[in-house]
Image: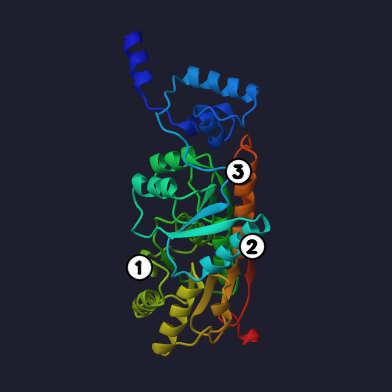
């Protein structure tokens, strides 16, 4: 029986991320050792090889597909519709140009969903590393990408996976927004959220619910909408429906300023005043938040800095193959405007 259990254990598929975690090195370092690259110290190489033996890790017969001499960064973004992405891309490009590198942008959306799609990009282009702004790929795909070249995630990141990323604390940011609404006397707070495939959507909804629970307020599922993309028309439609309920919300937390704009327009179409009848807090502090009437109270996140720091981290990983994965969490803050307070109107 003991021998049988041992054999079953040995058949378990071990990933390079698990090897990296146990060896306390980056996934890129493990990948270089597997492919006999010479950018790793002998001490580190021997340590990782020992861990591989201990875990009975059998590497795939694949080679890394990145080119350390390339000056091109591959940027994977979910779509071009979200205006928040523009500031992140700007930050990435600023850092890239400071290091004489270029950025190759690919919209993943529904077009790149399988491992072969990404590997074909790497095979057909000279890529030094990847920044992922899109939702985290499933673990097996992420493992393959990290094995192929240096990878950094930006804003979005893979939970329970050892990878470098730059992000914000979406849970605490959402709690800050809802706590502010509660402090102004609002008690029936709705949520206009995005698709839960996004980490930010899951975390902001968690923060929203935690804040309501802490304030002793009811979480009403019919006050919550999930929208597949950052789309004004969809937000307008969802907000119109929720505000038309017999027992409507007196406030909304929207996970995007685009969504918040939809709420404001919906309220006005229904003859409701903002903020007297309905208060609205958005997220991102994009230029649009100052263009509405009233302007939107919002959570400002440092979009440009998110992109810049992600690119700096990736370039450091390219230049320092032994560098361990690290995570950076940037601060956000509440910007109070007319959608929640009469005094600033």
Residue 263 in the image: state x and y as whole percent: 44, 78
Residue sitting at x 54%, y 87%: 293
Which residue is label 3 attached to?
Answer: 318
Left or right position of 237 against 341: left
Q: Earlier in the sequence, mark 2 or mark 3?
A: 2
Q: What residue do we see at 39% from left, 76% from top?
A: 239
Instruction: Name the one closer to the observer, 309 or 253.
Output: 309
Q: Are marks 3 and 1 in contact (CB under 8 Å)?
A: no
Residue assigned mark 2: 94
- Whole-percent x, y for residue 116 in the image: 34, 45
The secondary structure type at the circle numbered 3 is helix
Position of residue 255 relative to residue 120, above or below, is: below
SS at badge 2: helix
Residue name at image x 66 percent, y 54 percent: 99
Quadrant that contains the N terminus: top left
Q: Is residue 155 above or below residue 151?
A: below
Is residue 69 found left or right of 195 in the rendered image? right
Residue at 44%, 19% in the rendered image: 56
When the figure is inspected, residue 274 is found, relative to residue 50, above or below; the finding is below
Q: CA distance from mark 2 to mark 3?
A: 17 Å
> Residue 79: x percent and y percent?
42, 64
CA distance separating discs 1 and 2: 43 Å
Query: Is 66 or 249 nearer to us in this picture?
Result: 66
> According to the image, label 1 marks what residue?
222
| SS at circle 1 | helix
Compare residues 25 and 7 and report the one nearer the observer.
25
Residue 324, image quadrant = top right
| Percent of width and height locating residue 311 | 60, 54
Q: Which mark is residue 21?
A: none
């Amino acid at each position: 029986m003991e021998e049988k259990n041992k054999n079953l254990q040995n058949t378990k598929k071990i990933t390079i991320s698990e090897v990296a975690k146990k060896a306390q090195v980056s996934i890129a370092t493990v990948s270089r050792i597997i492919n006999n690259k010479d950018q790793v110290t002998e001490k580190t190489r021997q340590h990782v090889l020992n861990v591989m033996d201990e875990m009975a890790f059998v590497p795939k017969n694949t080679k890394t597909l990145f080119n350390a001499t390339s000056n091109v960064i591959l940027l994977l973004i979910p779509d071009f519709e979200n205006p928040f992405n523009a500031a992140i891309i700007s930050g990435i490009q600023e850092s890239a140009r400071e290091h004489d590198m270029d950025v190759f942008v690919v919209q993943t959306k529904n077009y790149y969903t399988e491992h072969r799609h990404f590997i074909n990009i790497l095979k057909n282009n000279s890529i030094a590393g990847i920044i992922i702004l899109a939702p985290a790929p499933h673990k097996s795909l992420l493992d393959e990408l990290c094995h192929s070249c240096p990878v950094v995630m930006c804003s979005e990141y893979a939970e329970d996976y050892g990878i470098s990323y730059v992000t914000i604390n979406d849970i605490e940011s959402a709690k800050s927004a809802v706590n502010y609404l509660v402090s102004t006397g609002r008690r029936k707070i709705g949520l206009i959220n995005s698709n839960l495939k996004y980490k930010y959507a899951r975390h902001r909804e968690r923060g929203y619910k935690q804040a309501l629970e802490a304030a002793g307020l009811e979480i009403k599922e019919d006050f919550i909408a999930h929208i597949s993309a950052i789309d004004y028309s969809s937000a307008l439609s969802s907000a119109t429906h929720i505000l038309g309920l017999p027992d409507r919300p007196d406030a909304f937390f929207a996970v995007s300023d685009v969504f918040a704009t939809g709420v404001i327009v919906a309220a006005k179409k229904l003859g409701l005043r903002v903020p007297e009848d309905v208060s609205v807090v958005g997220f991102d502090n994009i230029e649009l938040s100052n263009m509405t009437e009233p302007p939107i109270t919002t959570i400002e996140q440092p979009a440009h800095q998110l992109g810049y720091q992600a690119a700096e981290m990736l370039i450091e990983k390219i230049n320092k193959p032994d560098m361990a994965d690290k995570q950076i969490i940037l601060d956000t803050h509440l910007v109070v405007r007319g959608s929640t307070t009469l005094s600033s109107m």
